[in-house]
Structures are given as C-alpha cells and as structure tokens.
Image: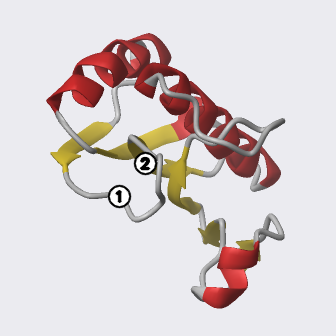
C-alpha cells in the first residue's frame, strides 16, 4: 500500500502529484525548489535555494518516518553552470557522510526564479 504526503500547495492538485510517496520501505520525494519558506519567493542565491529545498525535503522525509540521512538517490537540476558551482558545496556539506547515488543535470526549471530543483529517494527508518 502506498501512502502519500501532501503539503497543500495548489500545484499538487493542478499538476496531480504528492510531495512524497511512501512505497513500502522507500520514500520518494518530488522535485523540490528552494522558495524561501517565509516570503514564498526565490532567493537570488542558488546555494540558499538548495538549502531551502533540502530543508523542505527533510521535513517531508521526517513526516514519512525517514530523513536526509536515509537518502539513497539524489537528483539535482540546476539552470546553469554558475548555479551548479553554487549548489555543489551545499550538497557536499549535507551528504558528506551519507553519500547517496547522484544525478546532476543542467536544464530548464519551470518555476520562474528557480535556479535549483532537488528530488530525493530515501529508505524508511526502521
């Protein structure tokens, strides 16, 4: 049985997705951009966007009985090489001891102002 986690964001309904899906002992977290949680705007700094995205992902994982420490796959999408250079050290800090598999792509992100989007798959804590 799959359990879904929703944040209440309007796009979850309009685009038909869940923030996270728990499938057995695996938690899949949707691609998450780095909006500032207070202002709901995107910071100019890609590193700050990455930190915001990871905090949002960690909150969803914790609601699912997991955490970033349980990450097994990370997929990171950035808009350009400059954003990649800013985001890479943040990932290095967060995943230094965790070392999930990783995909890192430069591409367009649909949300205007977003410079990074991160998707995580994690195992569910025992």
Q: Secondary structure at mark 2?
A: strand
Quarter of the figure that contains the C terminus: top right
The residue carrying mark 2 is 117
Q: Residues within 10 Å of mark 1 (few under 14, many from 20)?
A: some
The residue carrying mark 1 is 109
Q: Secondary structure at mark 1?
A: loop
Residue 49 visible in this rendered orientation of the protein: yes
* Residue in front for this viewpoint, 44 or 17: 44
Q: On the image, which quarter does residue 1 sit in?
A: bottom right
- Residue at point 81% right, 52% down? 63
Circles 2, 1 touching at the beta carbon (< 8 Å):
yes
* Residue in front for this viewpoint, 122 or 80: 80
**In front of the other: label 2 or label 1?**
1
In the displayed structure image, the side of residue 13 where residue 25 appears, left or right: left
Q: Position of residue 110 (x, y in %)?
A: 40, 65
Determine the CA span between mark 2 and mark 1: 7 Å
In the displayed structure image, the side of residue 87 where residue 13 appears, left or right: right
Residue 102 drawn above or below residue 16: above
Q: Position of residue 56 (x, y in %)?
A: 68, 42
- Residue at point 36% right, 44% down? 74
* Residue in front for this viewpoint, 3 or 82: 82
């Amino acid at each position: 049985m799959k359990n879904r986690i929703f944040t209440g964001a309007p796009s979850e309904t309009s685009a038909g997705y869940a923030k996270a899906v728990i499938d057995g002992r695996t938690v899949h977290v949707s691609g998450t951009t780095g909006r500032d949680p207070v202002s709901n705007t995107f910071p100019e700094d890609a590193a700050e966007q990455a930190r915001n995205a990871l905090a949002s992902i960690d909150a969803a994982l914790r609601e699912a009985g997991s955490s970033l420490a349980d990450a097994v796959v990370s997929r990171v999408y950035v808009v350009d090489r400059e954003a990649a250079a800013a985001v890479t050290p943040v990932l290095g800090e967060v995943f230094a001891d965790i070392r999930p598999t990783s995909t890192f792509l430069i591409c367009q992100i649909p949300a205007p102002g977003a410079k990074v989007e991160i998707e995580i798959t994690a195992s569910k804590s025992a």
